[in-house]
Image (tube, grey):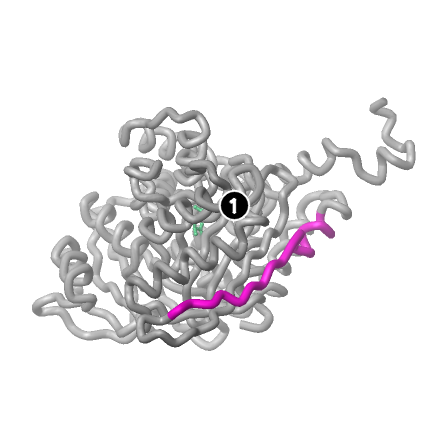
Amino acid sequence: MTDIFKDALSRLDKAISFIDVDKEALEKLRHPKMISQVSIPVRRDNGSLSIFTGYRVQHNSTRGPVKGGIRFHPNVSLEEVKALAFWMTIKCAVIGIPFGGAKGGVIVDTKKLSRMELERLSRGYMCMLADVLGPDRDIPAPDVYTNSMIMGWMMEEYSTIKRQYTPAVITGKPIPMGGSQGRDDATGMGAFLCIQELAKKLNWDAKNMTVAVQGFGNAGQNIAKVLAQHGYKIVAVSDSQGGVYDQDGLDVPPLIAGKLTTKKLKAPGAKKITNAKLLELDVDILIPAAMEDQITKKNAARIKARCIVEVANGPIKLDGEATLLRKKIMIIPDVLANAGGVAVSYFEWVQNKAGDYWTAKKVRKRLSDLMSKEFGNVYQTMTQYKTDMRTAAYIHALLRYSEAVKARGTEGYFDGENKLL
Ligand code: GLU
């Protein structure tokens, strides 16, 4: 994990070998704008005190206030949060929403907290970072092991601190607290829309397509559900404990119901499979929807999927990617494939600011229009530059981002070379 931010930045190098990007604009991307680290005191149910370390990295605000989720996980590190914040800057530029990137995290195993302790920790995080967050400054959202209830607590905490009801400070809230229709399944839906667009380009027939999903949290469940509804055969799914595999296809709705009620993956008649083996299945579409660095130089040569859809952030480590590309595996990159989440977060923020709430149908239509358009842009860039889809997404994002940098004036303008004025 130590080189994750460095790895993330080196994806830029490939993209800039195709286009001319102002060197100042590029240099800004290599340095997060602001990093906050806090120690959050939490009173435990037994009366003792625990201190948790939390981070917020505000990466780049050239295109607007910064935006990105908050992750609660035992492996959170500053390097990881920096990489995740950088990816948010790229992601918001790929889909053209007016935000820069940020990310937050707390080093914690939520499974070891009671509900009351989780609430105290969530409110404590907001309390300690309220001065650097805000609806026009930095707008958090859910991420791994955080959910709408946590977003609701944080919004209320912020509103109490500011003495003003402020729903637009955070997105992914419960609907009665200013959340948006369609935010819950937005990440899965965005990935599905990308797959549908690719299916049109490559003449896929859903009925002949097999899919394996690694990770069965919110995004993994929703992408499996919607793909199954559209005729794709989901042959394997897994969570952190391992997975289930059935070559005839799994029945997804009872799997989700079982996972939500018992926290376990149960499928009658299915074989057990490890996470490592799931990644190596011979399927048409592999969907890593869990954590970073799942496919590395150690297992890349054994990956047999025809297409990988990165629903997780950063599931393919830089050192494994070249092997996949050599094998002509098509990769829909995270900064496009999972952008549906932040897209609907943007819609939620717009609704909060306007005080005007949209129907589920309107949210769905806006998401579908946005994802189809930006998938099309990335695909066209890929064809134009004869490169892979990740590099194309970065080119597309960098061009948008550099326009915003240039609009403020760069070296060329200040040394008089640019005769605009
Ligand atoms: N955590 C999500 C992501 O990685 C959503 C961020 C947001 O909605 O701001 O894209």
Magenta region includes residue 157: no
Residue extending furthest top? 421
Q: In which quarter of the image is the C terminus?
A: top right
In the image, is the residue at mark 1 within 8 Å of ligand 1 by its beta carbon?
yes
Residue extending furthest left? 268
Q: Which quarter of the picture shows residue 56? A: bottom right
- Residue 202 visible, this angle: no
Q: Which quarter of the picture shows residue 368? A: top left
- Residue 204 visible, this angle: yes
Image-based side of 192 in relation to 243, left or right: right
Q: Is mark 1 on a helix, strand or loop?
A: strand
Magenta region includes residue 42: yes
Q: Which residue is drawn at 42% across and 40% down?
A: 345
Q: Determine crowd level at label 1: few under 14, some 14-19, many 20+ residues with C-alpha closer than 10 A.
A: many
Q: Position of residue 373 (x, y in %)?
A: 45, 32
Magenta stretch? 26-43
Q: Residue at x 32, y 48 (%)?
A: 188
Q: Which quarter of the picture shows residue 267? A: bottom left
Of residues 211 and 293, the one drawn nearer to the viewer in this rendering:
293
Is 156 situated above or below 419?
A: below
Residue extending furthest front? 47
Of residues 115 and 250, the one drawn nearer to the viewer in this rendering:
115
Q: Where is residue 174 in the image (x, y as percent from the top left)?
A: 30, 43
Q: Where is residue 341 in the image (x, y as percent from the top left)?
A: 40, 45
Q: Mark 1 points at which residue?
A: 67
Image-based side of 59 in relation to 345, left or right: right
Q: Which residue is drawn at 41% across and 34% down?
A: 347
Q: Position of residue 25 (x, y in %)?
A: 72, 45
Q: What residue type is labelled 1?
A: Lys
Image-based side of 2 in relation to 167, left or right: right
